[in-house]
Each structure stands twice: as structure tokens, then as C-alpha cells.
Amino acid sequence: MGIRYLQMFMDKKVMNGTYSVQMDREIRNAKKSTGKPLVVIDLNALFASICSDKRDLLCGNQVRRMERITGMFLKSLVDAGAELVFFNNGKLQPNKYEPWLTRKNDKYDLMINILDAINARMPLNQIVEKFDRTIPPNTCLKLRRIVKQYGKIIISTDMECDQALAIYATKHNALAVITHDTDFLIFE
């Protein structure tokens, strides 16, 4: 498990704790020396990043629009010269059953609270503010269908997805890893 809300802390509390990167420029620069730069993407992170508008999620976001935007983003990386490899979770690792079950039960309880707020006619902006961290992403998006147009998908079945991704990225000298997971702070 990573450090929950580390990026939010770094964004809000640490001066210059995070910074923006012009990915297309970085890919083009790397292409000059490496040929085809590798970008490894955690599919769960991609999923969460395109479902970041919580008001939209609560109202039923436009699935096709989100899929099109995701496709455009991935196409821009490929057009810049990157090779994309996507990682996704396979079967749940036995040592993760209990934490996974606990998270799912907690998520269910939190969703009941959100539904209660909606039933109580709480304004949408207040619901988003109050439950921002607990509103789940839209599960209707067909990300696997979209991403396989732009690169290879690797389903991690023998080990934790984060570990498999880190090993792959290191072994293949990836230019970048796109994730929202702070677990990578501990990998060498």
C-alpha cells in the first residue's frame, strides 16, 4: 500500500512539491537518443484520472466523451513517438483478500452515505465537497478496448500489479511511469 493522499499533501503543503511535465516534449527529446521511448501506464491510475470530475460522476458522466478524450490523450503520446505498455490487475493476491474486502465494505458504506445525502436533497456541490474522496470512478468506461489500440496490455497474475509494473519499467528502461500510486517510492 502506498501513502494515501501524498500527492494532495505535496500539492497543497510543500512549496514546489510537484510540477508539471510536458510529456510530448519529453518523449520527443528522449526519442532523439533512445529511438522509441517507453511509457508504462497503470490502467487503474488512467481510469481514476479521467474520472476526476466528481459532479459529472454523480450525474452520470458521458461515457463516450470520456473514452474519446482518453483516446486522444493516448494518441498524442504515440504520435510524439512513445511506445505504450499498460498494466492491470489480474487475480487478487491471497495476502490482499482481507484488505480488499475491508476496502469494498467501507466503499459500500460510504456510497450509502452519499445516497442518503442525495435523498436529503443536499446540493450537488456540497455532496462533492463532503464526499470528494469517496465518490468512485465510473465503471462503465471500456478502457481495455481503448488502450489496446495504442499499446500492449499486461495483466499481472503472478504478483502484485505495482511490483510487476516496476520490474517491467526498470528492466526496459522506461522513460516514464504514469500512475497515481506512491508504492513506487519504495521500488529500486
Image (spheres, grey):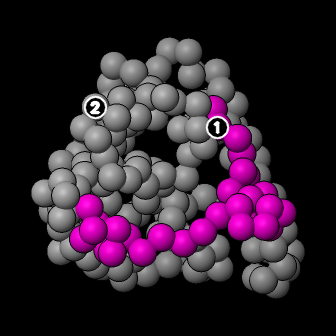
**What residue is shown at x 26% (from left), y 76% (from top)?**
76
Is any part of residue 129 visible from this angle? yes
Residue kind at label 1, given as amino acid type: Gly
Q: Which residue is at the front of the view, 78 or 160?
A: 78
* Residue 180 position within the rendered picture, expressed as x and y whole percent measured from the top left: 55, 52
Residue at image position (13%, 57%) is 35
Residue sitting at the far top? 94
Q: Is residue 44 left or right of residue 116?
A: left
**Image quadrant containing the N terminus:** top right
Q: Which region is colored magenta? A: 1-30
Q: What is the crowding at mark 1: few (fewer than 14 residues within 10 Å), some, or many (at least 20)? A: few
Distance of label 1 from label 2 (alpha carbons) = 22 Å
Residue 27: x, y in percent? Answer: 28, 66
Question: Mark 2, residues whose alpha carbon is within 10 Å: few (<14), some, or many (≥20)?
Answer: few
Q: Is residue 7 one of those drawn in magenta?
A: yes
Image disc number at residue 171: 2
The residue at the point 72 percent across, 45 percent down is 4
Asked if residue 46 is among those painted magenta in the image, a careful observer would answer no
Q: Amino acid at mark 2?
A: Lys
Mark 1 or 2, nearer chain start: 1
**The label number, if any, that marks residue 2 in the structure image:** 1
Residue found 75% across the figure and 74% down from its top: 128
Residue 73 x, y percent position in the rendering:
32, 74
Judge whether 31 appears above or below 6 on screen.
below
Of helix, strand and loop, which one carries label 1? Answer: loop
As drawn, the label of residue 37 is none
